[in-house]
Image (spheres, rainbow, N blue to C red):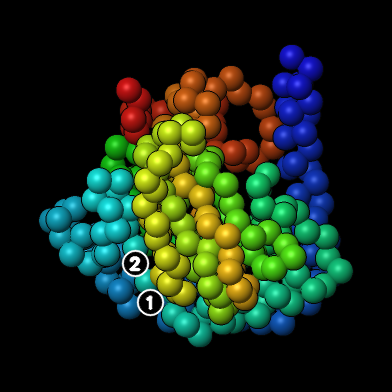
Amino acid sequence: MVELEQEVERRQRLGPESAARKALIASSYHPARPEVYDSLQDAALAPEFLAAAEYSVSPGADLKGLLQRLETVSGEKRIYRVPVFTAPFCQALLEELEHFEQSDMPKGRPNTMNNYGVLLHELGLDEPLMTPLRERFLQPLMALLYPDCGGGRLDSHRAFVVKYALGQDLELGCHYDNAELTLNVALGKVFTGGALYFGGLFQAPTALTEPLEVEHVVGQGVLHRGGQLHGARPLGTGERWNLVVWLRASAVRNRLCPMCRREPDLVDDEGFSDGFTREEPTTVDVCALT
């Protein structure tokens, strides 16, 4: 009980601490590539991604048609891949992230497993970049790919960049994401190793015997369910930077927490904390309830 209370207190501090960092960054940080803070433009996106998103909102669009515009990594595990960003945009974003990393600005950890990286909302990239990416492009795709997992009802996200380098984080143990759905985009730089590996949906890590390995391709994004057991192999050489977007649907998680697989007992917090809401959804769209 004491540990639970401490964890609640820790999580309640996250919001105010993050807001303070964001305010300081907004007032004092000078970007190296200010153009990445402009509203998301189609020119930043790969033609294949634009075509898939355009198809997804066209009359008569269906899963079969969409899959002709994506790479199916695993039909059984429902893992897909598609180019997301152009090479020039990846380079510009990386230069900005490295500039911020080298600054004296305060930095929050991306999550409890990664020690190196950037929370994009603290850097001021949520509103111009990540929110339009989710609302205009990812939601139509996810609605066709994962209708049973809230793909058409995504109403919040948590976006961060993780960095892997020698002497820093090298690998990531198998885990589930605190998300209904996930996009993982390789931004660069030059590296070997670090492949993603996948097990089953909510599979126990101890039962993982023959994982599916997926190599990173710079500029391309891997789409998967948040509950798909996964991890990252050790980095061999170089540096690997990945953009990870946890996509959340309150209509699903209000009824079924993606981490404990139980109905959540909510604690009031500021903002859209962890994607939960107090409001009851009119309809429930739940992935893998049984």
Whole-percent x and y of residue 250?
Answer: 47, 35
Circle 2 residues within 10 Å: few <14, some 14–19, many ≥20:
many
Q: Is residue 170 visible?
A: yes
Q: Is residue 126 visible?
A: no
Q: Residue furthest front?
A: 209
Circle 1 residues within 10 Å: few <14, some 14–19, many ≥20:
some
Would you say 116 lies left or right of 20 here?
Answer: left
Residue 228, image quadrant: top left
In the displayed structure, would residue 97 be above or below residue 126? below
| Mark number displayed over residue 46 | 1
Q: At x 76% / y 49%, what residue is drawn?
A: 18
Figure quadrant of the N terminus: top right
| The one of 216 and 52 positioned closer to us in this rendering | 216
Whole-percent x and y of residue 6?
Answer: 79, 25
From the image, tell me which residue sits under label 2: 82
Amino acid at the residue labelled 2: Val
| The one of 19 and 245 positioned closer to us in this rendering | 245
